[in-house]
Image: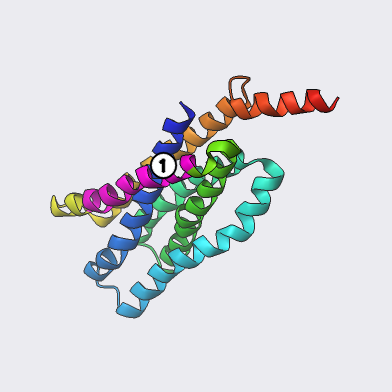
Amino acid sequence: MGTLLLWLVFVINLGEFYALQSWLPSIMTSLDYDMGTVVTATTLTTVGGIAAAFVTGPCMDRLGAYVTLGTVYVVGFAFVALTGVAFTAPLWVLLTANFFAGVCISGGQKSLIALSAVFYPTSMRSTGVGWALGVGRLGGIVGPIAVGAALGMGWSASAVFYAMSVPMLVAGAAVFLLGRWVRSDNHPDRKSAESHSLARK
């Protein structure tokens, strides 16, 4: 169950990442933004992902990996939706939304890899993380295709980003659920930790 939840989050996160990187420049160009603004907006999503590492890493150590990443995705839901609103708002609002969407999507992906390494026991860590990344690539394929199909059917740029925001909320819920499952007595890592603690005593 934990692996399936983790795969779901990888699929969503990589789908969001590649959809954003693939279509944001084209969408903004179609809305008559100048090329300099398009480049700035696209760059900010990447910069946001880099900046996220300086915040999410310490928070994962202090508050817990699952609480931190789940919160990142819920906040990402708000900023991806805000991007849809911001196409008709002042430019600074759009650029701010782009930056924080990048923090939550690109930064979330980096944090998700770290979380998956913690989730699996050492004996199967490389296999578990490798499979999660591989399955997640399905989202990386489907995400841009889904956005392209929506635009082809006449969806507005705002409607596309409203739709893109919903999976972020699903990812957040999945991470919170995964964290709850990990804290239960059924998770092998917890049992192993308890066994080692008893052995030391």
Q: Amino acid at mark 1?
A: Trp
Q: Residue at x 60, y 44 (%)?
A: 68
Image position of 52 with respect to 69: above or below: below
Q: Residue at x 56, y 25 (%)?
A: 181
What span is colored magenta in the figure?
127-147
Was residue 60 drawn as part of the magenta stretch in this picture? no
Can residue 165 be seen in this snapshot?
no
Relative to 42, 141 lies left or right: left
Q: Residue furthest right?
A: 201
Q: Residue at x 47, y 33 (%)?
A: 174
From the viewer's side, name the closer residue of 89 and 14. 14
How many numbered circles are shown? 1
Q: How is the image coloured?
A: rainbow
Was residue 144 drawn as part of the magenta stretch in this picture? yes
- The spot of residue 52 in percent (x, y) is 56, 58
- The spot of residue 82 in percent (x, y) is 41, 53
From the viewer's side, name the closer residue of 183 and 30. 183
Q: Residue at x 44, y 39 (%)?
A: 171
Q: Residue furthest front?
A: 123
From the viewer's side, name the closer residue of 98 and 116. 116
Image position of 92 with respect to 14: above or below: below
Q: Main secondary structure of the magenta part?
A: helix
- The spot of residue 165 in percent (x, y) is 38, 46
Q: Residue furthest top?
A: 185
Can residue 160 be seen in this snapshot?
yes
Q: Which residue is mark 1?
A: 131
Q: Quadrant of the N terminus?
A: top left
- Name the secondary structure under disc 1: helix
Relative to 8, 128 lies left or right: right
